[in-house]
């Protein structure tokens, strides 16, 4: 399917939201194929929102499955330097979902950028993921950050890993709970979440530009219910991960993330291992 040209633009401050009224194959693919030079002259940030996506792109070449209208977004902007954009997006998604569901401890990031939700049995399921593309343009970098969050997805049969959606998570609550939900999120509700996500992401981007990822490990503000610094799954625990560069499994204590988003592990032999490109993070 060719990408449609029919969309609505809404401008808010220095951000332009482009909302597609027809299905697109993938917001990420669309972002990569267009020339954004002129658009970025007039807007500091561009946010693509396609409620219907027919051939979404997930991490590691996987297909992002969507069976109905949902949260499919790409942010486009220029940056002076390369930052861990995917980790910033995943962190922002956890903040957003914690606020919207009022469940401050249920959402975690499985390194490098999978957004997970813990069900009531204590099992973690994937609810969102991020994808980033960066290219050098002169003295700066053109960046697009893709983020997919399952809000309405119900059919998980074609997905090769435990998966959940915001709707399925809220539907697991007691029916008398205020947040219990059987109906799909509407397009207007999804767009409200997109706006909230974009605003939070840009604040977090600025924070990391100034203070690095250490900003996400600072002492918690007791006045901010949703300011958790504990979104990193397995932080402080012994884990194993496959290092794609070394083609080997590495085991150690998950100490923190470096400022470029790499995993820092303290190994039993006293050495520190840094894993920049890795998969399959799990408890050792």
Image: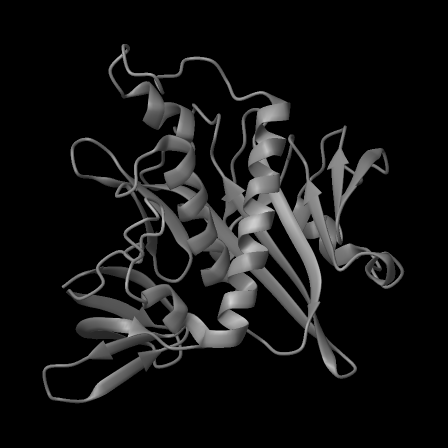
The quarter in which the N terminus is drawn is top right
Q: Does residue 188 lie above or below 54 as drawn?
A: above
Report which quarter residue 91 is drawn in. Answer: bottom left
Task: Give the residue drawn at x 63%, y 24%.
Answer: 187
- Residue 130 percent across, percent down from the top left: 50, 53
The quarter in which the C terminus is drawn is bottom left
Task: Give the residue drawn at x 64%, y 31%.
Answer: 51
**Closer to the camera, 148 or 191?**
191
Task: Give the residue drawn at x 54%, y 73%.
Answer: 209
Residue lying at the far right in this picture: please name it. 38
- Residue 210 percent across, percent down from the top left: 52, 75
Task: Please indicate, yes or no, whether residue 71 appears anywhere in the rendered image.
Answer: yes
How many discs appear?
0
Task: Give the residue drawn at x 75%, y 54%.
Answer: 14
- Residue 15 percent across, percent down from the top left: 73, 51
- Residue 233 percent across, percent down from the top left: 26, 56
How is the structure coloured here? one colour
């Amino acid at each position: 399917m060719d990408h449609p040209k029919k969309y609505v633009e809404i401008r808010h401050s220095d951000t332009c939201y482009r909302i597609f009224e027809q299905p697109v194959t993938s917001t990420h693919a669309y972002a990569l194929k267009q020339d954004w030079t002129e658009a970025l002259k007039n807007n500091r940030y561009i946010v693509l929102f396609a409620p219907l996506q027919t051939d979404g792109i997930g991490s590691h070449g996987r297909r992002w499955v969507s069976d109905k209208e949902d949260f499919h977004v790409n942010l486009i902007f220029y940056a002076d330097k390369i930052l861990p954009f995917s980790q910033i997006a995943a962190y922002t998604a956890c903040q957003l979902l914690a606020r919207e569901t009022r469940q401050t401890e249920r959402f975690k990031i499985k390194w490098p950028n999978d957004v997970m939700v813990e069900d009531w049995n204590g099992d973690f399921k994937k609810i969102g993921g991020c994808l980033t593309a960066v290219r050098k343009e002169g003295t700066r970098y053109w960046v697009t950050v893709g983020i997919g969050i399952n809000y309405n997805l119900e059919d998980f049969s074609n997905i090769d890993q435990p998966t959940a959606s915001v709707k399925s998570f809220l539907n697991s609550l007691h029916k008398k709970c205020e947040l219990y939900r059987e109906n799909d999120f509407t397009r207007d509700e999804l767009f409200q979440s997109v706006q909230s996500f974009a605003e939070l992401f840009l604040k977090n981007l600025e924070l990391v530009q100034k203070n690095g990822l250490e900003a996400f490990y600072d002492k918690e503000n007791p006045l901010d219910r949703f300011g958790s610094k504990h979104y990193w799954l397995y932080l402080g625990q012994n884990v194993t991960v496959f290092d794609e560069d070394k083609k080997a499994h590495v085991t150690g204590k998950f100490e923190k993330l470096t400022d470029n988003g790499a995993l820092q592990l303290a190994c039993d032999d006293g050495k520190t291992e840094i894993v920049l490109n890795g998969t399959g993070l799990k408890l050792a």
